[in-house]
Amino acid sequence: HNSNELPVKAYTTLERIVNATLQRTDYKIKVEGYTDSYGDPVYNRQLSKYRADMVKNYLIGHGISPKNIVAIGCGPQNPLKSNSTFEGRKQNRRVEIMVKKIR
């Protein structure tokens, strides 16, 4: 909640993405940050963008070209679970990464 730190388990996933895309200029990476629906909508949008940028910066720092990555802050859009429970809100605070090959 209200955090912009990467969880330890995220590093394994990020390393797999780096290893798979580092030498591939034909791959584009889309990073979407999300929040739960509690709090100020403007703040949530900024926090979700910050989360997405954190992942983007990690990938750039490990050699992925910035021109191959786009980061978007989605705020509370597209919740995975209901925001009415603690567990639901926890799951809605996330970053999703899509890797797509460009033809």
Image (cartoon, grey):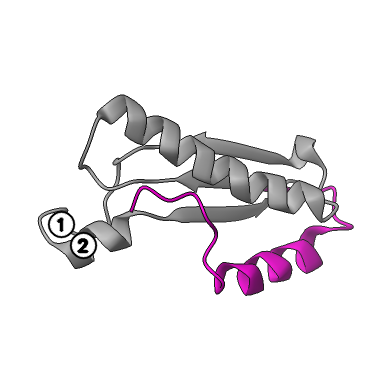
Residue beneath label 1, please? Answer: 82
Q: Which of the 4 image quadrants contains residue 81? A: bottom left
Residue 72 drawn above or below residue 94 = above
Residue 76 at what x, y percent from top left?
29, 41
Give me the residue at 76% from left, 62% from top: 18
Residue beneath label 2, please? Answer: 88
Q: In this view, does 65 lie to the left or right of 59?
A: right
Q: Which of marks 1 and 2 is nearer the N terminus?
A: 1
Residue 33 drawn above or below residue 84 = above
Give me the residue at 21% from left, 62% from top: 88
Q: Is residue 101 visible?
A: no
Query: Toward the viewer: 54 or 65?
Result: 54
Q: How crowded is mark 1: few (under 14 residues within 10 Å), some or many (20 or more)?
A: some
- Verify CB contact (< 8 Å) between mark 1 and mark 2: yes
Quadrant of the drawing holding the N terminus:
bottom left
Residue 28 drawn above or below residue 82 = above
Q: Is residue 76 visible?
A: yes
Amino acid of disc 2: Gly
Give me the residue at 30% from left, 55% from top: 92
In the image, the segment drawn in magenta is: 1-28
